[in-house]
């Protein structure tokens, strides 16, 4: 059975994502792309997000990749926007219903290799860029 959201075989995407988080939190070389890993994964798994949350993640990924804004700058820039006490929208979905109707992506988390930090970071960047390209073509009602 494939993941109903990203299409990865045998729903291995969640296991892989969890493995990547461990790598990224225990090795700074892998952690250098953590912001891209999370945004790309969440965009491909829209059932974890609200419509506004999905649009927010897509914009974050665009800022990281297109505008080349570093994560620290984005955190500072969005501090009030995402503060749960001030935020005017919900990010996480409670119902698990997919926000988008897309299950075919150019790349998934399974396309990322972990042999070393250079390969990993290159692959995460390539995956994130393909996710952004695919996500920008998604029209939300």
Image (cartoon, grey):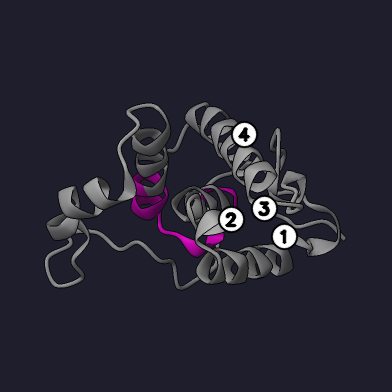
Q: Do tag 2 and tag 3 residues touch (Cβ < 8 Å)? A: yes
Sequence-wise first label, 1 or 4:
1
Q: Nearer the viewer, mark 1 or mark 4?
A: 4
Name the secondary structure under disc 4: helix
Badge nearest the viewer, 1 or 2: 1
The Cα–Cα distance between marks 1 and 4, rounded to whole angstroms, is 17 Å
Whether residue 48 is in magenta: the answer is yes
User: Residue 103 occupies which quadrant of the picture?
Assistant: top right
Q: Give x and y (percent) for residue 4.
A: 73, 55
Residue placed under numbered mark 4 in the picture: 126
Viewer-side residue, 52 vs 72: 72
Q: Position of residue 17 (x, y in %)?
A: 64, 63
The quadrant the C terminus occupies is top left
Task: Report the magenta residues as a range.
Answer: 43-56
Q: Which mark is first along the chain, 2 or 1? A: 1
Give the residue number, with chain letter if any, for mark 1: 13
Q: Secondary structure at mark 1?
A: helix
Which label's residue is closer to the chain start, 2 or 3?
3
Residue 45 - label = 2
How many marks the image carries: the answer is 4
């Amino acid at each position: 059975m494939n993941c109903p959201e990203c299409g990865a075989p045998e729903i291995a995407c969640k296991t892989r994502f969890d493995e990547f988080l461990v790598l990224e939190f225990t090795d700074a070389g892998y952690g250098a792309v953590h912001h891209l890993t999370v945004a790309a994964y969440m965009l491909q798994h829209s059932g974890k997000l609200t419509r506004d949350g999905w649009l927010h993640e897509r914009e974050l990924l665009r800022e990281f990749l297109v505008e080349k804004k570093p994560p620290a700058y984005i955190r500072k820039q969005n501090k009030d926007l995402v503060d749960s006490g001030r935020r005017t929208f919900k990010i996480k979905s409670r119902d698990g219903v997919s926000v988008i109707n897309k299950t075919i992506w150019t790349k998934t988390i399974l396309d990322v290799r972990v042999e070393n930090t250079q390969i990993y970071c290159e692959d995460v960047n390539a995956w994130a860029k393909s996710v952004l390209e695919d996500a920008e073509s998604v029209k939300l009602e």
